[in-house]
Image (tube, grey):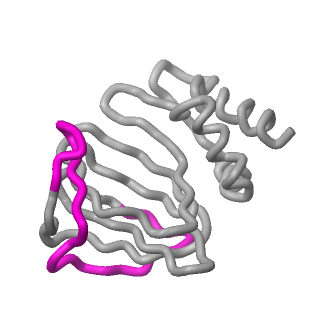
Amino acid sequence: MKLILTALLFAGFAAPAGGPEGFGLWKAADLKALAAAPSTMMSAFKALGQPASVGNYSFSMSHRDASGGVECHLTQADIFVIQSGEASLTVGGTLVDGKNRSATEMTATAISGGTETKISAGDIVTIPAKMPHQMKVDPGKEITYFVVKVTQ
């Protein structure tokens, strides 16, 4: 049942009503509902894909209960709006053993010389294109965040 409700919610993300083409409104209550049910939310993303893509930007919701790998988007900036939880975010520096994952993204084993910052609910993060970054989640912790990707 939760999956069906979440799928219906995402249908609203895909085609926001009540405005000109390209206009979108995501109410705080809708984002909180997604953050409250991360496993259902992730199933809905797998089933439906990203909720919206307009022009050079797209939206998604991410949930982590473990650390992510080091990544560097070559053509996209990231904007994170933290909905719940906490993590450490390392940004900047240089990639260690960087490898092309695709034409637009690199991965690495670590970041050398980056800056680590604690992030938590209510924070907004911007990461420009070509900036290495990694989100680290402590054992037993988790984080859910709304993501805007802007292709430059």
Residue 63 vertical placement versus 20 (above, below): below
Viewer-proximal residue among 102 and 133: 102
In percent of the image, x 59 and y 38: which residue is there? Answer: 45
> On the image, which quarter does residue 19 sit in?
top right
Lateral position of residue 69 relative to residue 92, left or right: right
Q: Which residues are magenta?
A: 99-125
Quarter of the rendering containing residue 9: top right
In this orientation, which residue lies closer to the viewer: 37 or 99?
99
Name the quarter where the N terminus is drawn: top right
Looking at the image, which is closer to me, 107 or 18? 107
| Residue drawn 62% across the image and 46% down it | 42
For image coordinates 43% across by 63% down, the residue present is 124
Q: For this view, does 123 lie left or right of residue 44?
A: left
Q: How many numbered tags mark residues here?
A: 0
In the rendering, at what x and y percent does residue 92 appear? 19, 69
- On whether residue 95 falls in the magenta region, the answer is no
Q: Is residue 100 magenta?
A: yes
**Front in this rendered view, residue 117 or 141:** 141
Judge left or right: residue 100 versus residue 35. left
Helix, strand or loop for the magenta stretch, by majority: strand
Residue 116 location (% of width, % of height): 31, 80
Q: What residue appears at the point 59 percent right and 70 percent down from the top-left corner?
A: 142
User: What percent of the width, then of the height, locates residue 103?
Assistant: 17, 37
